Structure formats: C-alpha cells, structure tokens
Amino acid sequence: MQKNWIIGSILLAATLEAGGYKIPEQSLDGMALGAAHIAHTTGADSAYYNPANMAFLDPKIRYLEGALNVVHLPSNEFDGVQIFSPSTVVPASASSEREWAAFPTMQYVHSAQGRWRWGVSLAAPAGMTKRWNSPVQKTFAEKFYLLTVELNPSMAYRVSDTFAVAAGLRLLYSEGEVDSDGVVNGIRIARQMKGDTVAAGYNLALAWHPGSGVEVGVTYRSKVKLNEEGEANLYLGGVGRQYHAKVSVPVPAALNVGVAKTFDDRLTVELVWERTFWSAYKTLDFRYDTPIPPALVPIFDDPKLKDWQDSNTFRLGLTYRWDERLTLMAGYAYDETPIPARTLSYELPDSDGHIFSAGFRYRQNEHLEWGLAVLYDHKTKRTIAPGENINGIVGSFDKGGAFLTTMGFAYRF
C-alpha cells in the first residue's frame, strides 16, 4: 500500500458538491432532485438514499438502476497576495485548471423475504481534482486528486405497514495523489505522494409512511477513522528522501432528515435537512519514522490546524408525474461550507453554495425507464481579509463550482 497516508489528508478535506467535497448525488433521481431524496424513494436507489424504504417497494419485484455521471469543474479564480512572512508578501492572483471527471453508480434491491429485504449500492461518495500551475499556488497544491468508491450492502425490516428500519455496512476504497513544488525563502521544496486505502463504517435508516401522502425518512452515516501509514517523498533544495509516515484522520458522520408530501398522486414535494459533523476534523498531524530536515518541519511536519465546523445543507425537491410515462424533477439546495476563513487553503477554496438541478425519467415499458439530469453548483465569492487566515492568504476566491450531468436507467424484473 504505497504512500496511502496522503488519502487521509485529501479525504478529510472531503466526504465534489456539498460542504467540503462530498458527492451526495448518486443516481438519476438523486441528481435531478439535488439529493432531496430521503423520504420519497421509489426505486433501486433506495438502497443508497434510504434503505428502510426498500421494505415498501413491491415485494415480488427486483429493482436495478445504473447511471453515468460526468463532472466539469470550472476554474477557481483568486485575486490577492500570499504572505510567506511579515517581510515576504508576493502577488498571487491566478486561476486553477479546469477539470473533467466521470464516475458510474449502481443500485440493486432484491425481492422481499417476508418482512426482510436486502439491497446494495455502488457509489462514489467523495472525490475531487484540483490543479494549480501558478508559482504561488503550486507551492502548496500543484495537484490534489481523490477517487473514493463505496460498496454499501444493507438490510431492511418492515416493522409494520407504515414503519421500517434498516442498517448497512460501508466499505470504502480510496486512491489519491498530491504534488507540490515551489520556492520558499529562496529554497526549493517539493513533495510527491500517491496511494490508496480501505476503510469501513456503517449506516442506519428509518422510514415512516403515516398516510395521506406523507413520508418521513431519517438516515445516518457513521464517522470512519482512518489510520493511515505509508511512504512520503520530500525534497529540500533538489535533494529528496523517502520517509515512513503515519496519520490518523476521521471521515465525518452525516445525518439526513427528510419529509415528503404527495398531492393528488402527481406532485411530490420533499424537504431535507442534512447535518455533516465536520467538527471532528481538528488538526492534521503527520508523524515520520525519522526526523525530517528542520527547514521542512513547519511545512510538512508541524500539526496543521483545520478546525472545521459542522455544516448544514437545506434541500427542496419537486417530482411531478406528467403522465403514465413521463416524470419531471427539479431541486434546489443551500449548502454551507464547513471551512472557516482562518484555515482556508488552495487545495479546497470552498464557500457556501447554491445548487440548482433538474431532470426527467421516461418509462419505456413496464420493465425499463431511462432519463437525464443536470446540476449546477454555484459557489459564492469569498474574501479573506488581512490577518484572517493562518496560511497567509489575503484576497478573494470567485467562480469555481461544478456542472454535473447524469444519464441513467432503471430496470424492474
């Protein structure tokens, strides 16, 4: 497992689009509704969004869904300066590179066995790619890349005709890379890190359908502590050395509460509150098997304060059954960033976001449905005042955000 310790530092900046760089949109409906998809789930993606709802699907039918998601990340634009020391302040206005990425998702729900029902989802719950080629920014974050894949089997139990519960196991595989290369106080410093890791957690869910078109859903995804170790290549003045390194970091827990109401069997309105417990991310502290050069200690060894904050996301989803074949969907979300101005950095210059989404689903026949969804995440401009940021950043981050497109299908048999 080569250099896998870097995954922890990237992933903790993570868990692309919802405070940090979590990716909650994991199906056609989830993308079209902006992840306002907790209480009212009616297909195979229940296995991911609320596995307790699997208990209320047609017990004789098996459900299968798949989707291809394409992500475009526009440039982040920074206008400001970088303070390396009280006497060293340099212009740092620059734009990050534009990025493209794609990832598949899939969900399956098996037919019921009495009151029990199982399902499984394959998701990409966290990810990012960020590159800076400008001299100042590449000193800290020339390249940051993360891919995370989650296999999530779950089991639901129908307690009554109106209430069900579920539990599941989260199995995560991650791989990532981080490079930086720059000059500080006339000396070249650089790092090259790459690796992968495996971790596990759990998820819990409940669903309550009291009647009159009302549905309530609650889901919880556990915190996962990553105990990472591997190798790191550090360079000082063009001379490099490899070290064995360790770091422990948490993946934060997340709570979702959704309430949906269906009117006249055509229009469904869902409200979702999501709370992500980012306050678990206090510091990032790397430990090496042997001492590293004193000039590198402040950059690569001293604990890095993160002090992230628990964040809220508020979601609204609308589903309208146009006729027996066509269903229209739309969503909006307000997404708080967990990153305080004090510890903001170039690898993730995050800000509060306004998320807009829309899509459709078309029933081709009694077995097959297909559809398309789009999502735009607009990031608000964020300004860092002098003395506000411990990383020496002074100025404004603008633009960035993300465009996502999903093409998906659903099959019942």
Image (cartoon, rainbow, N blue to C red):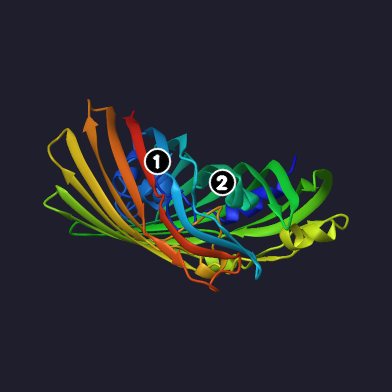
Q: Residue 341, how many percent across, how many down? A: 50, 68
The quadrant in which residue 390 appears is: bottom right
Identity, as a three-letter code, of the amino acid under mark 1: Ala
Residue at numbered disc 1: 112
Mark 1 residue crowding within 10 angstroms, few (<14) / some (14–19) / many (20+): many
Quarter of the picture containing the C terminus is top left
Residue at image location 48% in from the left, 71% down from the top: 385
Mark 2 residue crowding within 10 angstroms, few (<14) / some (14–19) / many (20+): some
Does residue 267 appear in this view? yes
Q: Residue 202, how many percent across, how many down? A: 55, 54
Q: Is label 2 in a helix, a strand or a loop?
A: loop
User: Mark 1 or mark 2, which is nearer to you?
Assistant: 2
Q: Is 277 positioned to the left or the right of 249 in the image?
A: left
Residue at numbered disc 2: 134
Residue at image location 13% in from the left, 40% down from the top: 322
Asked if 68 appears above or below 138 in the picture, the reply is above
The quadrant in which residue 227 appears is: bottom right
Asked if 106 appears above or below 22 in the picture, the reply is above
